[in-house]
Amino acid sequence: MRGTYAVPYASRGSILGEAEAKALEQLIGSDGSLSAGSVRDRFEKRFREHIGTRHALSVTSGTVALELAIHLLDLKEGDEVIVTPQTFQATAQPLLGLPVSVRFCDVDPDSLNIDPATLKSLITDRTRAVLLVHYGGWTAEMDEIMAMTRDRNITVVEDCAHALGAMYDGRRPGALGDIGCFSFHSSKNITTLGEGGMITVDRDDWAERLDRLRSNEVDGDFSPARHQGLITGRELLPWMKYASSAYEQVCSHIRCPGTNATLSEAAAAVGLVQMDRLHGLVECRREVARRLDEVVARHPYTRLQQPRPGVRHAQHLYTFFVDGPPGLREAVIRALDVRGVEVQLRYLPLHLLPEWRERGHGLGECPVAEKLWFSQHVNLPCQPGLSDQQVDHLVAALDDVLRSEVKGLSCLSST
Ligand SMILES: *Cc1c(COP(=O)(O)O)cnc(C)c1O
């Protein structure tokens, strides 16, 4: 069916145009470095000012951001990490290779974010970190969560892959927990030409470590001649006395075993322009969501996402729930599909993935997340690239489907 939908669930979540092309043209025309240069520095500055953290470090993807964040935690055997099950697999993927014990924390049935009361019941003396997501762009209840974790030396990692453009009581995700991880993948609210990510932190020592982990840039702070014990009278080989100036050179060295995962100048140039567009892009998403909400609110057996005042939903995903007789959600999805609307369910709860089942996780661990995913949850397209006609089609199809499927049910029950 893919490609034939009137309203596809598109793999591009942003809009790019003239301004991005111009920024790239400028970069190509310049003769500066294309790696780790001044454009990247400007993008990072813009990003940290937007989020409100002391530091923002660009990386090549959201997954890498999460990997480096988890690396920072120095987790040891026996440590416990609490993770939301309702997220994309990348959130917890770095934990698969570690000897830690993972506790999946069930979610709130409206926001699909980790439920603070359940979180509280899972915290033990061995809990070292919480990995949460702001599902779909609705921020988790961070004040409650931080109040539980702050004094216990538990690090809260926010997976903000959906949450760029969201607000939480005047603050932005990425500045609410201890470490924020963003994605600029093609499908996200902004993109740096398909792949990219950012890590936000306040702590200077973490920023410094992250910078070393994500790049092997020449630092020029190492002088062979001055390096302790390298040159002693006895070690001086015969040719060395003719090359004494080389020993006075400042050289780079490895510093710490990391990788090279910083953003290219081209990606950063596009990212800078996309930051100008961010507000408008999110407003487009919110407008589609508002129109869909109006339809959902009119029908029985459905439930809306309604964040409390103070939370601005970034609407990376549009989610609603079919809360009716068994089979109704499936009937609604099938009928939408027939009317050319591509529906996707994001995401199968992580603890049900084979990799986590192999580690002893499985059905029954997070009953709310499971029940919603298996029988209630629906995601509809809401990307800003939809034309007015597509949005009209989507809204009309949803109205029609909810009306006819529910009518079908009442016919059945009256016979
Ligand atoms: C997209 C996404 C990621 C991974 O980001 P990439 O940039 O694709 O590596 C992580 N977590 C969530 C919730 C995501 O949606």
Image: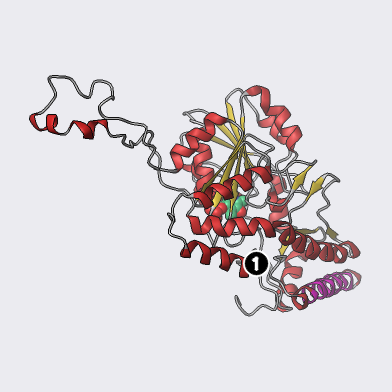
| Residue depicted at 53% across the width and 39% down the height | 69
Q: Which residue is mark 1?
A: 15
The crowding category of the residue bearing disc 1, from other C-alpha atoms within 10 Å (few below 14, some 14 to 19, many at least 20), is some
> What is the three-letter code of the residue carrying label 1?
Ile
Where the C terminus falls, by quadrant? bottom right
Rendered location of residue 67, percent (x, y) = 50, 43
- Answer left or right for 179 relative to 324: left
Rendered location of residue 397, percent (x, y) = 79, 75
**Residue 50 visible in the shown view:** yes
| Residue depicted at 45% across the width and 48% down the height | 261
- Name above or below for residue 312 compared with residue 177: below
| Between 87 and 252, the one nearer to me in the picture | 252
**Residue 17 visible in the shown view:** no
- The part of the chain drawn in magenta is 392-412
Where the N terminus falls, by quadrant? bottom right
| Residue depicted at 81% across the width and 61% down the height | 325
| Between 108 and 32, the one nearer to me in the picture | 32
- Name above or below for residue 232 compared with residue 249: above
| Between 162 and 1, the one nearer to me in the picture | 162
